[in-house]
Image (cartoon, grey):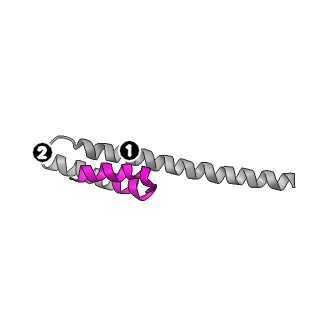
Amino acid sequence: MLGIIALVATLSTFLGFNFIGPVIGIITGHMARKRSQEAGFGDNEMGKWGFILGLVFLGLLVLGWALGISFGIVGGLASLMAG
């Protein structure tokens, strides 16, 4: 069940939950994989993909923030120099 929650939470990024969805996906994906291994089952595939995609989407979000900030700084400096 946690694996499904992890995958759905991570994919909720496409619905506008850009930060909270991947964070919930990472946490619940890790919990799902850990509980499956403790119970003696194989790796929880949905939990694994929720965890991996959560990391990827969170990384893309941070990269987007960094690029947005840097473009803002460069644009601001260019307008000051043109001024």
Q: Residues within 10 Å of mark 2 (few under 14, many from 20)?
A: few
The image quadrant where one finds the C terminus is: bottom right
1 vs 2, front mark: 1
What span is colored magenta in the figure?
1-25
The amino acid type found where label 1 is placed reads: Leu
Q: Residue tagged by mark 2?
A: 40
How far, Cα to Cα, is label 1 from label 2? Answer: 25 Å
Would residue 11 be found to the left or right of residue 30 on screen? right
Query: Which residue lies at the image location 77% right of the left edge and 53% below the top edge?
Result: 77
Residue at the outermost front position? 15
Q: Position of residue 23 (x, y in %)?
A: 39, 56
Can residue 19 be found in the magenta stretch? Answer: yes
Majority secondary structure of the magenta segment? helix
Would residue 20 be found to the left or right of residue 66 on screen? left
Element type where label 2 sits in the image? loop
Residue at the outermost right position? 83
